[in-house]
Amino acid sequence: MSERDSRVDAYLAPLPAWQQEVFGELRDILHAADPEIEETIKRSVQPYFVLDGNVAAFLAAKDHVNLFVYDGGIVPDPAGLITAGHDNTTARTVGFREGDPIDREALLVFLRRLIADNRAGGWRKLTGRR
């Protein structure tokens, strides 16, 4: 399992307890999806999870949190996880408000497929787009 980045801890520390809890669970799910996933900070402050390309990123808002999933637009979503981003070519958002349940198993399936697509060359290669 890859190490956790202390800069991600620093991003989470000032957040309300419920947001810390949601991001903590999402972080665990991302690492469970593939132990080789790496944490980093991009855009100066935003936590990213990468493996053969961007997999996901965190963004906290006042009343919700977002898990941005890169190339999520080409991954099947039978569980209806995606809450926003349908107008984006590939990226999608899975949003959570305080008290929302997290479907761990559905997220694991989704993220594992996304990571497999990354390893296969990403959305450009898989869709033939340039």
Image: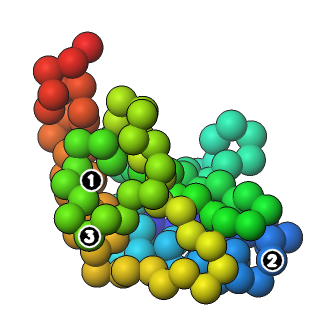
Q: Determine the secondary structure under disc 1.
A: helix
Q: Quadrant of residue 29?
A: bottom left
Residue at mark 2: 16
**Mark whose residue sits in front, 1 or 2:** 2
Nearest the viewer among 121 and 71 is: 71
Q: Is residue 15 left or right of residue 37?
A: right
32, above or below 7, in the image: below
Residue at mark 1: 115
- Which residue occupies the extreme right position in the image? 14
Quarter of the rendering containing residue 129: top left
- Please state which amino acid type lies under the numbered disc 2: Pro
Q: Quadrant of the N terminus?
A: bottom left
Q: Residues within 10 Å of mark 3 (few under 14, many from 20)?
A: few
Circles 1 and 2, Cβ within 8 Å, touching? The answer is no
Q: Secondary structure at mark 2?
A: loop
**Nearer to me, 70 or 115:** 70
Label 1: how many residues lie within 10 Å, few (<14), some (14-19) or many (20+)?
A: many
Quadrant where the image shows the C terminus: top left
Amino acid at pointer 1: Ile
Foreground: disc 3 or disc 1:
3
Q: Is residue 17 visible?
A: yes
Badge 2 local density, few (<14 within 10 Å), some, or many (20+)? few
Residue type, label 3: Ala
Give the residue pinned by disc 3. 79
Choose the circle earlier in sequence order: 1 or 2: 2
Asked if residue 19 is positioned above or below residue 74 in the image, the reply reads below
Q: Is residue 24 left or right of residue 63?
A: left
